[in-house]
Image: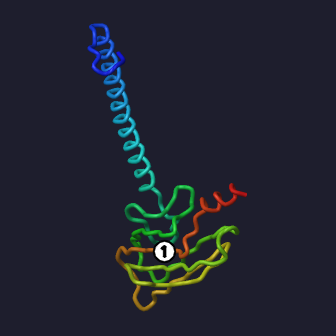
Amino acid sequence: MGAAGHVLNEDECKYLRAAADRRDKWVEFYQKMELEKSRQIAKQAAYIRDILARVRAPLTGYVMQEGAAEGLCPDGWTKARIVLTVRPLEAVTALRFIGWRPDYAPASAAVTLRINGETAAEAVVGQGMFEIEVKRTESPIAEAFLIEAECDPPFRPEAMTAIWRSC
């Protein structure tokens, strides 16, 4: 094997066939491994979705969460947007949303509460504990309703971690 126009002998042909065969087997091995890893990742993602679908909001009073919630984490933290459906066991005349923001969160954030898509309350909250109350004395809620809570700007602890690591 060498110069242009060289005619391959039998040993050189066997060597090239064996090399191509080895390459093809490696390609097949990596394709199978890629398919297996993709199945494993899909299975783990489904498991994580199932766990997150089982997270319940810490509700008190005569209400129950219906179905999966969006934005709740199993460790008690939440994302910047929370959505859940609540079924009252008795007509709801008031809601109290209680939260906590760590000392290293931005000094203030706007929190908006929506009931069935309509803004029910807005408040600027600081660090530490906060409460937002919604009174519904004129029209109590007797049927299942959707609660959305959104924080702006969103607080992302992982961004703070990245800042601390860079120091």
Q: Is residue 18 left or right of residue 94?
A: left
Q: Which residue is mark 1?
A: 149
Residue 160 against residue 43 in the figure, above or below:
below
Q: Residue 102 at what x, y percent from top left?
A: 67, 67
In the rendered image, the quadrant that contains the N terminus is top left
| Element at label 1 | strand
Q: Residue furthest right?
A: 167
Residue flagged by tag 1: what amino acid is it?
Answer: Ala
Q: Residue at x 49, y 82 (%)?
A: 94
Q: Residue 166 at what x, y percent from top left?
A: 69, 56
Q: Is residue 122 left or right of residue 106?
A: left
Residue 141 against residue 30 in the figure, above or below:
below
Q: Residue furthest bottom?
A: 138
Which corner quadrant of the image does residue 155 belong to? bottom right
Q: Residues within 10 Å of mark 1 (few under 14, many from 20)?
A: many
Q: Residue at x 36, y 34 (%)?
A: 36
Q: Residue 41 at what x, y percent from top left?
A: 40, 42
